[in-house]
Image (cartoon, rainbow, N blue to C red):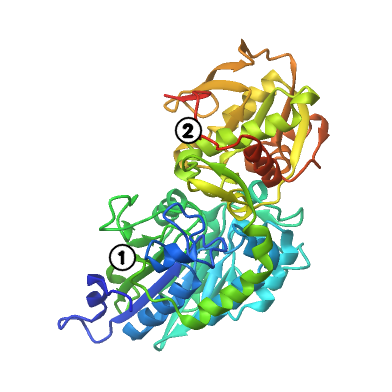
Amino acid sequence: MMRLTQTVAALALTAGTAAADYSLTILHTNDFHARFEPISKYDSGCGSEDNAEGKCFGGSARLVTAIADAKARSNNSILVDGGDQFQGTLFYTYYKGALAAEMMNKVGYDAMTVGNHEFDDGPEVLAGFMSAVNFPVLMSNADVSNEPLLAGKLAKSTVIERGGEKLGLIGLTPDDTGDLASPGDNITFSDPVSAVQGEVDALTAMGVNKIIVLSHSGYGVDQRVAAETTGVDVIVGGHSNTLLSNTNERAAGAYPTMVGETAIVQAYAYGKFLGELNVTFNDAGEIVEAVGEPLVMDASVTEDVATVARIAEAAKPLEEIRTKVVAETAAAIEGDRSVCRAVECPMGSLIADAMLDRVKDQGVEIAIQNGGGIRASINAGPVTMGEVLTVLPFQNTLSTFEVDGATIVAALENGVSELEEGAGRFAQVAGISFTVDSAAEAGARISDVMVGGAAIDLGKTYGVVSNNYVRNGGDGYKMFKSAANAYDYGPDLADVMAEYLAAQGPFTPYTDGRITVK
């Protein structure tokens, strides 16, 4: 069974606590990304032998056990999710939202917010997921009234009762979801602060004084929402895959992070942790105490046998695809988001080189791959197609187009415009090199741009290859939407990478200084 943490003791009310005080355990996950099977320390697949040896983390079967144990320890608990259940493995490619709905219903979630990846396949797949789950899916900062599939179904907030008390839950999603995913033309997104405050005011008017925001907006935005709103007690975060902890040296901040009277929590990603925040409210709905710690889903957490069997059954149709060995690598290929969204990373250079190699006979000189499209690392040794698809799960296709040098520079500036947030727009490249001044203002960070060994000519037309998501304006690359001679229907990017890797023989990962960050 799962090892208990010291924080669990905080659940018990102290002898001096007033009788009117109310204790609540908030269990939470975020950015699960279809990791139904256990994952390695690299957040990619982890085989059955490694799992038996205790080297794996997460997986639905561990979460089932951990959630049941945590609920049993609490007199009042809720289980919520900070968004991005969708996308990330072949399970999503094959089942879309159906398996996520099944697993979330199994463990008894009380609510979740919409993540940007919930829109990867448009409103239709999200609507199907919502009809399958037994809990509300929330999003406050968007107008869905003109989207028939979601109008009247996707609420901004909800009220649930637990232990005789009303709890107000508000959903929040990135206000740039239109750039990050495919919500369609009928949904408009708005600023998170005003949206949350509007729902807080409405809930307060109903007599609800314990308010929890489920936010898929990132740790930075969550701190801004906490600072600029009144009445929010807890923010359960997501999107930035931030580990908050009081014991883990890799944590980005304390668990909870307090901003004024608001407690902010987030539990990394991929089911590697289960967040457990124990909150005590007074009769006025004010937080008296908020303590806890994410529980690591390592080998000390016993896997639920029935869930192991169910996931194995669900995996059968995927086996032929995922187990095919397509290449070999002499060392692990680094694809972690913290690297690929900040500096040149080995996986980014590999993908960009593979893209450029595929279309080099078409006069294309430059490749640009958004760092946010790189979703995992790959271990040393044989490389399976399943591993490649975990790195590049979005079924993006190769896009070729033509733009001038000035547009290329604007695109590179866009790539580093949100460097501080670790945004997915960071450009991994091939055929081009540049320098980034991270201390400069956004829009003036790029210099020393070289193409094919010569300084970029702002007036010259260049052939570019990217993926169809970036070419069509995703991750802020709107400057490419009007590109000349655009063709968005090339081969799947995962296939391009797999075939390029296979042609290399035993592959040695590399970076070569094409991106210099100062």
Amino acid type at image mark 1: Glu
Q: Quadrant of the N terminus?
A: bottom left
Q: Residue at x 78, y 30 (%)?
A: 401
Q: Position of residue 150 (x, y in %)?
A: 72, 68
Can residue 260 be spotted in the picture? Answer: no
Q: Nearer the viewer, residue 23 or 312?
A: 312
Identified at 49% across, 29% down, the residue is 511
Task: For mark 2, give the secondary structure.
Answer: loop
Q: Mark 1 = which residue? A: 293
Q: CA distance from mark 1 to mark 2?
A: 30 Å
Residue 210 or 431: which is nearer the viewer?
A: 431
Residue furthest right as drawn: 485
- Few, some or many C-alpha atoms within 10 Å of disc 1 (few <14, some 14-19, many ≥20)? many
Tell me whether the residue at label 1 lies in contact with that at label 2, contact meaning CB atoms closer than 8 angstroms: no
User: Which of the 4 image quarters holds residue 208?
Assistant: bottom left
Q: Secondary structure at mark 1?
A: loop
Q: Which residue is mark 2?
A: 343
Amino acid at the residue labelled 2? Val
**Quadrant in the rendering for residue 408:** top right
The image's mark for residue 397 is none
Can you say which quadrant of the picture contains the C terminus? top left
Question: Left or right: where does residue 346 sit relative to residue 481?
Answer: left
In the image, is 486 to the left or to the right of 444?
right
Q: Relative to the observer, which residue lies in front, 487 or 502?
A: 502
Q: Residue at x 60, y 36 (%)?
A: 505
